[in-house]
Amino acid sequence: MNKEEKAALLEETASSETIQDNCTTLEYVKKYLDLNLPIIPLAHLKKTPRIKGESWKRKHTLEEFQEGDNIGLICGMEANSYEYFMAFDFDSPNSKVFNELIKELKAHGITGIIQKSGGKHDGYHYIIKTDIPIKNTKNIKFKDY
């Protein structure tokens, strides 16, 4: 699969309601692995790795996933040659901080996808792809606009 085909599949997977509503966990896993995304099996309805140890430090195979697993995207790990992912976590896509961040990223030619995160906080993730490795930015506080 060439770079253009991977980009098209990622866009289709991220934006198609029909695909999102009808895929099983393992079908999603297969699509993500075909895109060489660094994903990890998470415990059912949780954000913790299902496989104990340091499994978040490596790429996983289809056989390591089970139907019903949550799927985590490992941010900061190289997905493809010089491709890294970063996720911003927001309570609402309507917040001033969220909109200012999107505006600033777009000004630098960086776009991403918005994904409803679900769970007990029912928030949102804004996921971007970059060619720069990104270290953990957990708990960075943005100024209120």
Image (cartoon, rainbow, N blue to C red):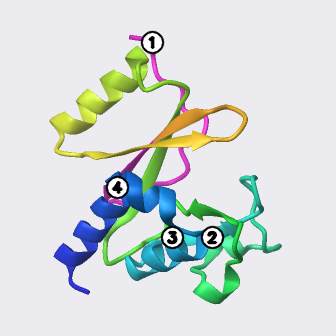
Q: Which residues are magenta?
A: 126-145
- Mark 1: secondary structure: loop
* Distance between the alpha carbons at the discs numbered 1 and 4: 33 Å
Q: For mark 2, give the secondary structure.
A: strand
Quadrant in the rendering for residue 14: bottom left
Mark 3 neighbour density, 10 Å: few (under 14) some (14–19) many (20 or more): some
Amino acid type at circle 4 is: Ser
Residue 40 image point, x, y percent: 63, 70
Say which element carries label 4.
Answer: loop
Q: Which mark is residue 16?
A: 4
Q: Which mark is residue 144?
A: 1
- Per the model, the C-alpha gap separating discs 3 and 1 is 36 Å
Q: List the residue tagged with mark 3.
A: 28
Q: Quadrant of residue 36?
A: bottom left
Disc nearer the start of the sequence (3/4) = 4
Give the label, 3 or 1, closer to the camera: 3
Q: Residues within 10 Å of mark 1 (few under 14, many from 20)?
A: few
Q: Nearer the viewer, mark 2 or mark 3?
A: 3
Q: Amino acid at mark 1?
A: Asp
Name the one closer to the observer, 52 or 20.
20
Q: Are marks 4 and 2 in contact (CB under 8 Å)?
A: no
Q: Determine the main secondary structure of the stretch shown in magenta.
A: loop
Q: Residues within 10 Å of mark 2 (few under 14, many from 20)?
A: many
